[in-house]
Amino acid sequence: MNFSSKLLENAVAEFSKLPGVGQKTALRLVLHLLNQNKQEVEQFSGAITKLRNEIQFCATCHNISDTAICEICSSPKRDAGVICVVEDTRDVMAIENTSQFNGLYHVLGGLISPMDGVGPTDLQVDSLVERLKDGEVKEVIFALSATMEGDTTIFYLNKKLKPFNITISTIARGIAFGGELEYVDEITLGRSIVTRVPYENSLTK
């Protein structure tokens, strides 16, 4: 692609680094910004810079937060006896949108994937185990994507959590194998949370 300006080319190159954004889409986005007034563009770039510099991760559940402890973990209205284990923040948002879950979350920050060099020590596993030691948690729900990596992670976590006297369950498989939680419609995801099953039972089906 030939550019009439090096500045334009550099901006397009940066936008092209975003997932799912090719050169043509990047060019369209850059040209759109050029058509906006300077104040709007500065507001856009300022929001991104502020996000990167000031964003925090909840010290309890590791969800993205504006404060040291996120609003969900600090809310007295949430059921602290139930923890829903998810891959990342997008899954927290997806489940929250269903309005079917009132417990707390634990964000692993990924899934076990030997092919990608991701092992248990790369995830927030130890902090999950620590959260169970005070005996307040009565149930842990695995809400991970129905993929090989998701199933591998659940199998590993189940072994780690077995010594605790808690219920270990997994969301019902109304979600097709290979499905990512963030792309599942709210009704299906909500039902899968409500109709969760004991993890051991899910292995026989």
Image: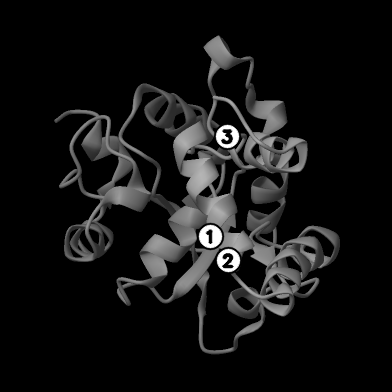
The residue identified by callout 3 is 160
The residue identified by callout 1 is 32
| Kind of residue at disc 2 | Asn
Label number found at residue 54: none
Left or right of residue 115, residue 8 in this image? right
The image shows residue 59 at horizontal and vertical percentages of 77, 62
Q: Tell me whether the residue at label 2 lies in contact with that at label 1, contact meaning CB atoms closer than 8 angstroms.
A: yes
| Kind of residue at disc 1 | His
Q: Nearer the viewer, mark 2 or mark 3?
A: 2
Q: Is residue 173 above or below residue 99?
A: above
Q: Residue furthest bottom?
A: 77
The image shows residue 66 at horizontal and vertical percentages of 74, 74
Q: Is residue 142 above or below residue 57?
A: above
Along the line of sight, the residue nearer the viewer: 128 or 48: 48
Label number found at residue 35: 2
Q: Is residue 41 above or below residue 57?
A: below
User: From the image, which quarter does the N terminus lie in?
Assistant: top right
